Image (cartoon, helix red, strand yellow):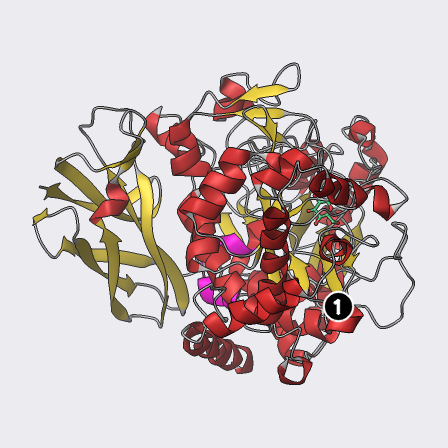
Amino acid sequence: MKRIVRQLVLGLAGLLAGGIASAQLTTNDSKQEDKIRSLIRRMTLAEKVSLLHGNSKFYVSGIKRLGIPEWALSDGPHGVRAEINRHDWAYAGWTNDSATCFPPGTALAATWNPKLAYARGIVLGEEARFRKKDILLGPGINIIRSPLCGRNFEYMSEDPLLISKMAVAYIKGLQSKDVAVSVKHWLANNQETNRDAVDVHMSERALREIYLPGFKASVVEGGAYTVMAAYNKFRGDWCSENEYLDREILRKEFGFKGVLMTDWAAAHSTVKAALAGLDLEMGTDKKDYNEWYFADPLINAVKDGKVPVAIVDEKVANVLRVMITTKMLDDEKREKGKMNTPDHQQAAYNDAAEAAVLLQNNANLLPLDFKKIKSVAIIGDNATRRHCNGGLSSEIKSLYEITPLEAIQKKFGAAVKINFAQGYEKQSSFKEGNNAGQTSADKVDWKLIDEAVKVAKASEVVIVFGGLNHDFDTESFDKQNMDLPYGQDVLIREVAKANPNTVVVIIAGSPVKLSGIVQRVPAILWSWFGGMEAGNAVADLLSGKVNPSGKLPFTLPVSLDQSPAHALGNFPGRDLSVNYEEDILVGYRWFDTKKIVPQFPFGYGLSYTGFRIDNFSADKASYGKEETIHAKCTITNTGAREGAEVVQLYVSDPQCTVVRPEKELKAFDKIFLQPGETKTVELTVNVADLAFYDEGKKSWNVEPGDFVLHIGNSSRSISSSVKISVK
Ligand code: BGC
């Protein structure tokens, strides 16, 4: 109960604070712009350029005589990374840089609760400030295009609206603490294979409808202070020097007034990048920082007349604008931050608790009543494995991380006999840039299985903790397949034969194949990488103290070949080039349009209670193009436990001159309900948001005619639909 109350309080705080938002980056503040101009006037060319490139792994020089401090950057998206040596990648060995570790991106998105994203932003901002960081590199918001992308776990979803809602809340929370975000990776880092060479091609429509909206929302609504250019090329040009992306779209269309930085070692030129709008070069692999593209070569390019000094001034102004907005030049007034508070840990717990997705629960095996159970078998490497310190740049030196076994022992061990068996062994190993470690990862270890079967037979209930680890879900390479590694299918099959009361908990940050187990076990809970509070959250979910309310932020295919990029054979591309032929049909847009039945659909997730959606209506039958649709429904908790349901509004355009997805998510809300309680839910959709991107007209187009609004609790579970028309 205490937890629930606290959760409510935090939620309310987020809601209230949501209105406060962070200071906006603006060029309309004439005093600020005067200050920027006056500072620039007093700088030598060398001083200006010193602000535009790293002076170490994560710092940028300041200009002491002008009161401009050094700029401190840090990873990452779900916790403040431990301190790294200034001039190499080894950890600095500090003793005070252990941090709060949140569940990564897909888990956050699975909560479908932007208030939690806001609350996370606050915590990250406070911890970043405590560590005296000025920019925290995240959130990672690339579209989950393939189940195999190594960084899917850091990213959020296959759906641009879900990404946008979560990212905007995260950014507002974080930047309200005087820390800049760096929204990454701009753009189309949808695979790790050849990420630093691949040339990504997609239609203008796919760009506009699928790949840009998260970034646009982050900049325009979220007010992101910095953006990080991806490693890959886009339509032939590196993202860090891509005139179309960086100048035309980011600056001109989105009105971005902040800093565009490179990913680490993603710069490839001086003049081209400077003219295209890059501001800050980070991570280049040259020992002498003066040799970096945006160091001496930039000074020389100005002297040679190849880069106008006004372009350098524009970049310096962007840097200063972010510094001023985050109060770097006004330290007295700046947020001081705090670290590892109970509230921070509570926020990490809340995310893990709300993220878990109940995929299957036959005969209501879950929740388990640990007061009645005498013995439980806990099986699987993931019952005891800690994950916060993996994944590469997003790894966290977590203050602590509670494993599932530890939590179950602590919470129930006094009354229930816990029989542990390893079940399978982690056979892989991680080496940056080399996924050879995965190849031997599917051996069936009968000795471990026999032990597990023995333990399963001797226990009333079995919980298998399986899934992946950060040898698979990691920056730097992609998974080779979607399989559950290390012979887990066989292990689970044998254990379930020995004891039908088997629950499987999947710990993973990206889609894995469940077709080998769904028919064999009654209950499956997907609990993601759960951050520092992973074990506590999963134990509370299994015991029913917390009712699962997470929803899949991506489609879970039966097999890889169902998935669009793989069905069309264009992942990871050929000859260092990839063409997104599936176009706008990414994720459920593909599955629903092509009528392919996935294992579990986008937006799906069960609860220990039941919900009913009724009375769906729109406020009018016909709308003008400038109008807003106000849709309404009621939602009732039909069961005996409190719980939360995510009401999802999808829209179809049945008749259109271009192919449109069968349906697209246009609004959602997570509703918390007591047993028997009914609430009215109001969802709004701007008619303008029903548009498709018209390549012929080079603009958004809402064709007049009928549209259908659907209300439901997954892309494939629609309770009711209403037709509206647009004039
Ligand atoms: C990653 C970025 C990260 C940077 C700094 C790069 O390899 O792609 O996401 O922020 O390293 O660690």
In the foreground, 150 or 521: 150
Q: Main secondary structure of the magenta part?
A: helix
**Rendered-image quadrant of the C terminus:** top left
Q: Secondary structure at mark 1?
A: loop
Return the x and y of residue 550 as percentages of the image width and height.
Answer: 48, 55
- Whether residue 444 is visible to the viewer of this picture, yes or no, is no
Residue at 16%, 53% (x, y): give it: 627
Return the x and y of residue 411 as percentages of the image width and height.
Answer: 69, 72
Residue at 85%, 37% (x, y): give it: 431
Residue at 21%, 24% (x, y): give it: 657
Query: Which amino acid type is shown beneath numbered disc 1?
Result: Ala
Up-down: is 521 above or below 116?
above
Name the residue carrying label 1. Answer: 99
Left or right position of 574 against 43: left
Mark 1 within 8 Å of ligand 1, using the beta carbon: no
The residue most toward the bottom is 332
For the record, the magenta segment spans 108-118
In the foreground, 334 or 355: 334
Return the x and y of residue 5 as percentages of the image width and height.
Answer: 49, 81
Q: Quadrant of residue 726?
A: top left
Left or right position of 339 against 561: right
In the foreground, 158 or 550: 158
Return the x and y of residue 200 as percentages of the image width and height.
Answer: 56, 26
**Residue 299 on the magenta span:** no
- Whether residue 38 is visible to the viewer of this picture, yes or no, is yes
Badge count: 1
